[in-house]
Image (cartoon, helix red, strand yellow):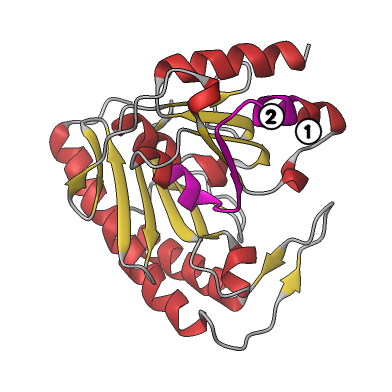
Amino acid sequence: MSLSTDQLNEYRRFAETLADAAAKAIMPYFRAPLPVQDKGGKLFDPVTEADKAAERVMRELILEHYPTHGVVGEEEDNVAGSSGLTWVLDPIDGTRAFITGMPLWGTLIALNDGNRPVLGVMNQPYTGERFVGAPEGAWCNGQALKTRACASIASARLMCTSPQIFDNEQQLAAFNAVAEQVQLLRYGGDCYAYCMLASGHVDAVIEAGLQTYDVQALIPIIEGAGGVMTAWDGGDAQHGGPVVAAGDPVLHAQLVAQLSAAMR
């Protein structure tokens, strides 16, 4: 679906309204005692009332203002809309950071036009940072973002949330082969690492095991700042799985070549 500039601006304003509502729901819980549930799986997968409350308030606003739009979220069932437009929500990306008091988490909000995410917001209410990506660019609190030039793996600053994120030993080995070549490797960050890439402080993020709600808001932010985000084989990243993001398209091509070769 092709959206006009006026429609994109309208939906961008609404995405920021969703971010404000989620922040209001989340912040009373941050660095406060709260019960944590484990959703299960290979790794400890925490969820809190903050996650649930934030997604609930965003869904209520979408239903009120755009009842024909679909919704995909982490904490509740997907809703199929009739308009061709879908909001993709992760109320707290980085819940492990959230429950340990670290500010490396954020609310992710994307609008998918039926083909790909065209708008993305990452809101970090504790630090007061809001990253926005759209077809015409990317910004943090209104300031334009630009990725850093970095044309070689050897000079790259690489981030990954955790070495435990990889689905199997082959993926981990492929990541480690790249990590051994870079200038700097840092773990942690979740969605915040991708926004630091868009801001020009990080050159690459390599991860796996991601869901669609983990990535869709970040794609417009990275692309709007001049970067590239794809699957390891260079394909579409919007459905999650193993993803690679880079600020420099030359570096991205090198990473895709190495990662895809390692997975054959």
| Residue 166 against residue 151 in the figure, above or below | below
**In the rendered view, does 47 fall on the left or right side of 254?**
right
Pick whichever, 161 or 107, lies toward us.
Answer: 161
| Residue 132 against residue 20 in the figure, above or below | above
Q: CA distance from mark 1 to mark 2?
A: 12 Å
- In the rendered image, which quarter is residue 256 located in? top right
- In the rendered image, which quarter is residue 100 located in? bottom right
How far from the left and from the top, in percent, is residue 58? 42, 64
Labelled disc at residue 180:
2
- Amino acid on which disc 1 is placed: Leu
**In the rendered view, does 83 fall on the left or right side of 40?**
left
How far from the left and from the top, in percent, is residue 257? 61, 11
- Amino acid on which disc 2 is placed: Glu
* Span shown in magenta: 174-195
Do the residues bearing badges 1 and 2 touch, measured as CB atoms within 8 Å? no
The residue labelled by disc 1 is 172
Is label 2 in a helix, a strand or a loop? loop
Foreground label between 1 and 2: 2
Report the quarter where the N terminus lies: top left
Residue at point 60%, 60% (across, down)? 76
